[in-house]
Structure formats: C-alpha cells, structure tokens
Image: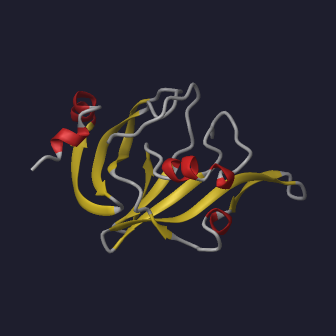
C-alpha cells in the first residue's frame, strides 16, 4: 500500500532515522493509529501541519518504531515557536512503540531539491529511498533517482515483488 496525502500547502514532514542518518518522510505512518484512536490526535495544527504533529520513526533491529511525536507550541516568555514532545500522551506513557500496524512503502527523499512545489509532499528531490515495511518489520529497500521515482510513483508495491 502506497500512502500519501494531498495538501494545498507544503507540509512539515515526519522523520525517519535509518542507519544512523535522519531523513524526511513523505508518508505518515502514524495516521492509521490516529484514525483508530482519534482522541489521541493533537488538537491544534496549522496550514503547514494539517495532521497536527510531527513524528520521528527509527528502524531498530529491522523493526519500525515511533520514537517521538511532537507538536508546535508557542513560548510566551521567549516569544517564539517551540516543539514539545507529546509521545507519552499519545502512547499511554510509553516513550516508543513498534509500528506493527504499518504495512507499506516508506518514501524517503534525499539529496538536492530538483523542483520545489508548494503543495503537500510534491517537491521533487535528487534521490529516493523506498523502504518496504510489513506489519512494522523491515523487508528491503531500493534507492532510485528522481526520474525513476517520477516514472514509478503509484507502482511501488509492484517493484518489490520477488
């Protein structure tokens, strides 16, 4: 299953830590969780953050884990926006959780921006890492360039067939 959302404004991405590197994600693996538990979804958002949170995931021993969920707040003393971790509120006191509900392709853009598009996750990058996850377990990955990505968009499930 290839998951993506369409937004009229460029969105702040979720993040993935993989092999010691931190990447942007252009899929949102927490969405099935918040659809199942809507009362746990943060209440405030912005045009650049329609889902109302930023999650950070990590592949730990070939399993996908959520390791942080943050919301943007305003510090009245410092008079600036800050990010506040709310993961324990979302996960009933836990500080991380295996994402066993996620099956799909993690789409990880990296490299230089090839074409900026001020809408959702439509900006194009030099390269993409496609990581296949089944029930929260790492299966395999594939690195492609932006031309291959443009040709394959929507067909990622098929390219991982054995």
Position of residue 113 measured from the top left corner of the image (x, y, whole percent): 40, 36
Please name whichever residue, 66 or 114, is drawn nearer the observer in this view of the structure. 66
Outermost residue toward the front in this view:
36
Numbered-mark total: 0
Q: Is residue 96 left or right of residue 78?
A: left
Position of residue 80 measured from the top left corner of the image (x, y, whole percent): 80, 51
Q: Which residue shows up at 63% across the image and 38% down it?
A: 50
Q: Is residue 53 above or below residue 85?
A: above
Q: Quadrant of residue 158?
A: top left
Q: Which residue shows up at 23% across the image and 32% down it?
A: 152
Position of residue 37 measured from the top left corner of the image (x, y, whole percent): 60, 53
Q: Which residue shows up at 24% across the image and 31% down it?
A: 147
Please name whichever residue, 97 or 77, is drawn nearer the observer in this view of the structure. 97
Please name whichever residue, 24 or 94, is drawn nearer the observer in this view of the structure. 94
Position of residue 82 measured from the top left corner of the image (x, y, whole percent): 73, 56
Q: Which residue shows up at 36% across the image and 61% down it?
A: 136
Q: Is residue 60 left or right of residue 97?
A: left
Q: Is residue 90 left or right of residue 122?
A: right
Please name whichever residue, 118 or 68, is drawn nearer the observer in this view of the structure. 68
Q: How is the image coloured?
A: secondary structure
Outermost residue toward the right in this view:
77
Q: Quadrant of residue 46?
A: top right
The quadrant the N terminus occupies is top left
């Amino acid at each position: 299953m290839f998951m993506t959302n369409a937004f009229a404004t460029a969105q702040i991405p979720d993040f993935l830590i993989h092999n010691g590197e931190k990447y942007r994600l252009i899929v949102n693996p927490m969405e099935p969780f918040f659809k199942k538990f809507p009362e746990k979804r943060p209440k405030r958002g912005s045009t650049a953050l329609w889902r109302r949170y930023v999650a950070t995931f990590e592949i730990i021993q070939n399993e996908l884990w959520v390791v942080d969920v943050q919301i943007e707040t305003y510090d009245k003393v410092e008079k600036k926006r800050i990010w506040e971790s709310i993961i324990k509120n979302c996960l009933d006191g836990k500080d991380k959780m295996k994402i066993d509900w996620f099956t799909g392709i993690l789409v990880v853009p990296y490299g230089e921006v090839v074409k900026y598009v001020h809408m959702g996750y439509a900006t194009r990058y030099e390269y993409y890492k496609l990581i296949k996850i089944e029930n929260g377990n790492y299966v395999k990955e594939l690195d492609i360039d932006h031309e291959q990505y443009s040709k394959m968009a929507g067909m990622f499930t098929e390219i991982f067939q054995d």
